[in-house]
Structure formats: C-alpha cells, structure tokens
C-alpha cells in the first residue's frame, strides 16, 4: 500500500521540527528502506574493516602497539554490532543482513578493498580512515532516526582512540629511520585519495543525497564533509612532516578552505563494483571466518539446551 | 527469509543462523548511582550468555557497574498512536508543579 500523502506530510513536519523518529513510529516505506540500506552498509563496513587491520595484529612491532590494535579491532566488531542492532529495529533480521554480506550481495565501504602492505598502513588507516569516519559519524549522530543516532554517539566516543593510535604510529615512523620515514610517506601516498573517496560522490552526482538530506538522515553534504576532513588533516600532516600527495593543495584565503585536486571517480566506481585490489579476498575471508565460527555457535546452542534440560529436571524432581 | 538464505553460495555455512537466537534488550547502570539506561540489544542463546555478550559489546570501557538483560518479547511498551490520550492525564494537572502555588514576595521557599 502506498504511503498516504497526509501521513508523509505529518512525518516530514516532525522531521522539520527536529523530532527524533523511533522504531514504532510511522515512517514512509522509502525512509525505512533507505535506512536499512545505509545502516546495513555501515555495519558491514565495520565488520569488513577488521580484515585489513587483523592482518597486522601478529606482526605489530611492539607489545604496546599490539594491545592498541587488538582493542581497536575489537571495537570495530562492537561498532558493527551496535549498527546491526539499530538496523534490526527497522524490522529486518541481522542474520538476513549477514547472509547478504556473505553472498556478496551487500555493499561496504570501498576503502577496505585496498591492501595493507606495511605496518605504516595501520597508522594511515587510523589517521585517515578513522579520521574521515569521525567527520561523517559526528554528522550522523544527529540523524533523524533515534537508534542510528544513538549508535553513532556511542561509536564517536570510541573512534577518537582509533584516530590517535594511528596518528601516533605515523608520527613515530616519520621521526624514525629513513626507511621508517619512507614507508610512512608511501602509506600516505596510497591511502590519501581513497580516504577522500570515503565521503562518496559529489552531492550533485549522488543518487541518494537529496532524499537522505530531506529526511534528516544526513545533515551535511558529501562535499562539505570531505572539505572539513581535508581542512583538519593538512595541519596534522605538516606537524609530523609528511606530505599529502596532491600538487594542487593550497590554502584559499577567500573561503578559508584547503583547495584540493580532482578525485579519480573512475577508480571509485571500479572498486565499488567489485574490481578493487582485494574485493574477492575480503569476501572469501569473511566467508571463511563465518564457517570457522560455526562450531562455536553450535556449541552455544548445545550448552544452552543442556542447561535448560538440567534445570527442568531439577524443577521436576522438586515438584515430585 | 528461507528463500534469501538458500540463495547464499554453498560454501557458506548455513547452520546456526545466530540472528534466530532470542533478542535481549540491554540496560546499563553507569557508575555513581545513576539510573539504568537502555544501551541496545544482543542476540544470545540464554540469559547468561546474553549478559556476557552485553558486557563485551556495551561495556568495554567502564561504562557500567551493573547490567540488566531482558528478553525483548517480555517488554510491554506504550504505542506512538496512543501517545496523546495516554499521557494526557498528566498534562492537564498544573497543580502538580511548584509554580502553580504562590508565595509571598521575597520569601525563599527552597
């Protein structure tokens, strides 16, 4: 049944008045669908995001670094769960979303299809990828859908640790031996542009932006967020003596913004559509992990059944 | 759902769909005597594992000194449609607020 125009008007008036939409409230079918799409992609990104970093846990250079990275990767699992839990309030089962991911039918952030070649990549991910995510998620913490906004608040609190541990890695490498400095700069060169792509296509080319903005799911445009990230990051790079790989980068006194060069959107499109460096490997790793964890899930079910049976027997003998 | 599931490649384990484990709502009590607050939900086979999952998911940094997990199906909630009439009895009773009562000018009552 199509949504009645009156109901949609009333709904949009609530959004305009700054009210939060909660799970049992009426919402247009399209609002629900857009949220399920966006939130599940976000949750999948958190989960797949564990893979590039998980690679380096056993190879972290010191115990301090290893502890930090372990905690960060565990956080990413938690973030995935917060957002899956929020998505389930829209009436879809988490298992169905996980199935879509495992079947290769779901999207996740393209950035995780790039390889982590050296330890410096772990620094660059924390600094750039988590830095960009903070800019985006700080905006989403004001989203009109309550469960999504609340999950974002929780995530933002934890994400700052991720960014700082990454930046510290980069600062340390940059001040280290010539070889350490070299891998730090190399990681910056490889991760900078894909990080700018994380904000998505320019608003004028983004099919979903207008609707998401009208319904208060997004409060700022992709270009505005991207510019904010660039403005924040330039000074951080200068401070640790690393160069952002953009010959066009210059401060625009008129706007106060850092002007940056054109983004290669063809590369973005290729990676989104499955032709990134590691799309197939990431999916295979997720499927392997899901399969390898099956015995744990089976054991949990068996254990619960056994305990329930034992409790039942005790209750029966007490009654006898 | 069964159809969607059968569409998964054969390589993917199709047993133990953890989403079909019962859903539990998680409430955390922050330190220093604050009241319990809803944090989110977890899937778990039983109450004990729900509690452990809730700790791992929602309390990794000292956010809580107590956790409640409640089966989602056990919660009875007011509905948005009834919101007007349901809360109305409280809204038209200004005499429940201190501002309703006048006191002599210049007297501090609290």
Image (cartoon, coloured by chain):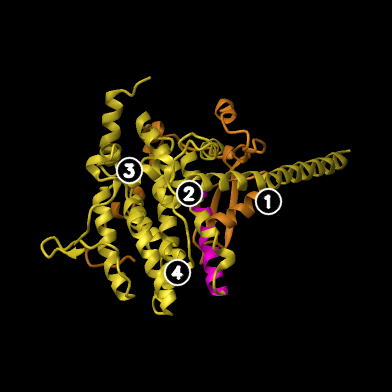
Q: Is residue A211 left or right of residue B60?
A: left
Residue B83 percent location from the top left of the image:
39, 35
Instruction: Write the start and end of the magenta stretch as one range.
Output: A63-81
Q: Are marks 3 and 4 in contact (CB under 8 Å)?
A: no
Mark 2, residue position: A278
Q: Are marks 2 and 4 in contact (CB under 8 Å)?
A: no
Label 1: element kind: helix
Quadrant containing the C terminus of chain A in the rendered view:
top right
Mark 1, residue position: B48
Residue lying at the far left of the rendered structure? A254
Magenta includes A80? Answer: yes
- Chain at numbered mark 4: A
> Could you say which disc has been placed on residue B80 in the image?
none
Rounded to the nearest whole Å, what is the CA distance between mark 2 and mark 4?
Answer: 25 Å
Residue lying at the far top of the rendered structure? A1
> Which of the two labelled residues, at mark 3 and mark 4, occupies the earlier sequence position?
4
Q: Nearer the viewer, residue A291 or B110?
A: A291
Rounded to the nearest whole Å, what is the CA distance between mark 1 and mark 3?
Answer: 36 Å
Mark 3, residue position: A217
Rounded to the nearest whole Å, what is the CA distance between mark 3 and mark 2?
Answer: 30 Å
């Amino acid at each position: 049944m199509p949504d009645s125009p009156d109901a949609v008007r009333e709904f949009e008036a609530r959004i305009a008045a700054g009210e939060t939409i909660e799970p049992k409230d009426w919402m247009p079918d399209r609002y629900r669908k857009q949220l399920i799409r966006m939130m599940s992609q976000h949750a999948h990104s958190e989960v797949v995001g564990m893979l590039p970093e998980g690679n380096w846990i056993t190879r972290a250079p010191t115990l301090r670094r290893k502890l930090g990275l372990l905690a960060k990767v565990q956080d990413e699992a938690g973030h995935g769960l917060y957002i899956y839990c929020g998505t389930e309030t829209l009436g879809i089962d988490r298992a169905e979303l996980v199935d879509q991911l495992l079947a290769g039918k779901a999207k996740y952030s393209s950035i995780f299809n790039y390889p982590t070649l050296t330890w410096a990549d772990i620094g660059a991910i924390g600094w750039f990828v988590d830095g960009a995510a903070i800019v985006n998620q700080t905006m989403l913490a004001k989203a009109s859908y309550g469960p999504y906004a609340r999950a974002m608040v929780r995530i933002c609190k934890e994400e700052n640790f991720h960014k700082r541990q990454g930046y510290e890695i980069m600062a340390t490498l940059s001040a280290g031996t010539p070889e350490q400095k070299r891998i730090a700069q190399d990681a910056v060169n490889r991760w900078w542009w894909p990080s700018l792509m994380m904000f998505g296509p320019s608003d004028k080319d983004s099919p979903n932006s207008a609707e998401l903005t009208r319904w208060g799911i997004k409060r700022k445009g992709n270009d505005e967020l991207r510019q904010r990230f660039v403005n924040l990051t330039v000074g951080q790079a200068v401070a640790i003596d690393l160069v952002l790989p953009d010959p066009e980068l210059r401060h625009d006194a008129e706007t106060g913004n850092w002007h940056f060069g054109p983004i290669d959107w063809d590369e973005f499109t290729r990676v989104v559509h499955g032709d990134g460096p590691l799309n197939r490997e990431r999916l295979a790793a997720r499927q392997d992990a899901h399969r390898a964890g099956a015995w744990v899930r089976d054991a949990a079910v068996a254990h619960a059944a056994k305990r329930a049976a034992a409790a039942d027997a005790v209750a029966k003998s007490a009654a006898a | 759902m069964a159809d969607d599931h059968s569409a998964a490649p054969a390589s993917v384990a199709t047993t133990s769909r953890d989403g079909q484990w019962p859903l539990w709502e998680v409430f955390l009590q922050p330190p220093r005597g604050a009241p319990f607050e809803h944090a989110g939900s977890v899937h778990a086979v039983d109450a004990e594992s729900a509690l452990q999952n809730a700790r791992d998911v929602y309390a990794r940094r000292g956010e809580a000194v107590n956790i409640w997990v409640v089966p989602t199906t056990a919660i009875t909630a007011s509905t948005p449609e009834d919101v007007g009439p349901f809360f109305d009895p409280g809204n038209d009773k200004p005499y429940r607020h201190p501002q309703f009562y006048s006191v002599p000018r210049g007297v501090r009552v609290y």
